[in-house]
């Protein structure tokens, strides 16, 4: 019990912050997964700017332009 009490004391700020926000990093992890998939699809792009543009399209749920 003493170890548990010490652990709670050392991590109290983080515990209270988590309780206050009551959230997780699931949204960021999901976005990272989407960006990783986009990076795999963009393997043949010539420059990094095209990859960044595709990430904006995917993250913003925009339609791809039809030419």
Image: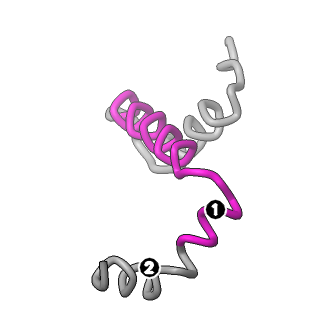
> Which residue is pictured at 63% across the width and 70% down the height?
17
Location of residue 42 by image quarter? top left
Location of residue 45 by image quarter? top left
Assess whether residue 16 is covered by the magenta stretch: yes
Assess whether residue 27 is covered by the magenta stretch: yes
Most distant residue in the front direction: 1
Drawn side of residue 46 relative to residue 24, left or right = left
Q: How far apart are marks 2 and 1 (CA)?
A: 14 Å
> Which residue is pictured at 44% across the width and 47% down the height?
47
Quadrant of the rendering where the N terminus is positioned: bottom left
Q: Residue 8 carries which label?
A: 2
Range covered by the magenta-colored residues: 15-42
For numbered disc 1, what is the local secondary structure?
helix
Quadrant of the rendering where the C terminus is positioned: top right
For numbered disc 2, what is the local secondary structure?
helix
Most distant residue in the top direction: 66
Residue 35 lies, in percent from the top left, at 47, 40
Residue occupied by mark 1: 19
């Amino acid at each position: 019990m003493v170890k548990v009490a010490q652990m709670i004391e050392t991590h109290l700020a983080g515990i209270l912050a988590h309780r206050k926000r009551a959230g997780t990093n699931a949204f960021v992890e999901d976005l990272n997964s989407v960006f990783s998939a986009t990076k795999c699809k963009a393997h043949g792009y010539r420059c990094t700017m095209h990859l960044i543009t595709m990430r904006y399209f995917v993250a913003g749920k925009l339609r791809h332009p039809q030419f």
